[in-house]
Image: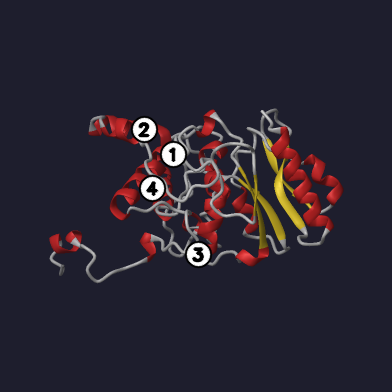
Amino acid sequence: MTDTNTLSKIQEKARRLLEDGKVEVVIGFAAGTVPGKSTPSFISAKEDCESLVWDNGCSLNLAKYVLKEKRKAAIIVKGCDSRSLVNLITENQIKRENLYIIGAACPLSASCAGCQVKVPVIYDELIEDGSEIREVSTIAERRYDDVLEFEKLSAEERKAYVYGEVSKCIRCYACRNVCPACYCKECFAEKSLPQWIGKTTDIGDNLIFHLIRALHVAGRCVDCGSCQRACPMGVNLRLLNHKLLMEVGSLYQFEAGLKEDQILPLNTYQYDDPQPFLAKGGGHE
């Protein structure tokens, strides 16, 4: 469903930015070739702004596309896209001054029912939609019903479920390629010296790939769901991401991408950090 009022404001703002020369490209969404699936669009001519859409099909995280963009760009963002931009700015992957951020309330509905950040946390202009929600500065409570239900299973049942899910993987790397937090120039999955994992779809290789990728985005994942939407095999990728989100929140009281001055918990070290795993191995506390 399209909010025509919000859409017209987005189109007009994009047109003015290009017309005034404030940006060279607008990154947004246009209608895709599959019904109900909008596609990322890069618009550099003001006449083409009419092709922009803002509806339930705008599910991908557009923050991924600013990583290689060299032009002065405007980007139209939902709550999760904006949180990924905060991460990328914090990690010095993009420069805030090179972006004009157009924020709008998320047009998605049931597919993101658990999201508590419906409105962007960072923007140069917020497209008002008449809702009561204006901005979100913190997440009071997050539900991890899927993780809690999974943890009720026996060890054998959990293993069987995980093995069943990762065995579906065909190693197309769509999950990695669509994720804004995955920006390494050389992925561990493709290294040959040393070789971390094999290139096969054997259960062992698949399991290691998904476990290591999940750990790499721990404390940085904003739960946008792009990885699971992109997976052609329907692997339940969000269960593992939710588990790590829950643990990072519990251990560090941290949610990624909410503040521009954030310090990522797994990028820091304190001398008084507890180290029981070292003590058990004979190390010093």
N-terminal of the pair, mark 3 or mark 4, is 3
Give how far apart the Cα atoms at labels 1 and 2 are: 9 Å
N-terminal of the pair, mark 3 or mark 1, is 3
Mark 4: amino acid: Leu
Report the side of 134 relative to 197 (left or right). Answer: right
Question: Viewer-proximal residue, 58 or 240?
Answer: 58
Report the side of 150 relative to 92 (left or right). Answer: left
Give how far apart the Cα atoms at labels 4 and 1 are: 12 Å
Q: Which residue is mark 3?
A: 91
Tell me whether circle 1 and circle 2 mark residues in contact (CB < 8 Å): yes
Quadrant holding the C terminus: bottom left
Label 3, residues with CA under 10 Å away: few <14, some 14-19, many ≥20: some
Q: Is residue 53 visible?
A: no
Label 2, residues with CA under 10 Å away: few <14, some 14-19, many ≥20: few
Residue drawn at the location 37% of the way across and 41% of the way down: 141
N-terminal of the pair, mark 2 or mark 3, is 3
Q: Is residue 146 visible?
A: yes
Q: Which residue is mark 4?
A: 211
Please tell me in which quadrant of the rendered image residue 148 appears: top left
Mark 1: amino acid: Arg
Report the side of 158 relative to 91 (left or right). Answer: left
Coordinates of residue 180 in the picture (x, y in percent): 55, 52
Q: Which residue is mark 2?
A: 146
Mark 3: amino acid: Glu
Residue drawn at the location 46% of the way across and 51% of the way down: 137
Q: Which dot, 3 or 4, sits closer to the camera?
A: 3
Coordinates of residue 185 in the picture (x, y in percent): 56, 62
Q: Which residue is mark 1?
A: 238
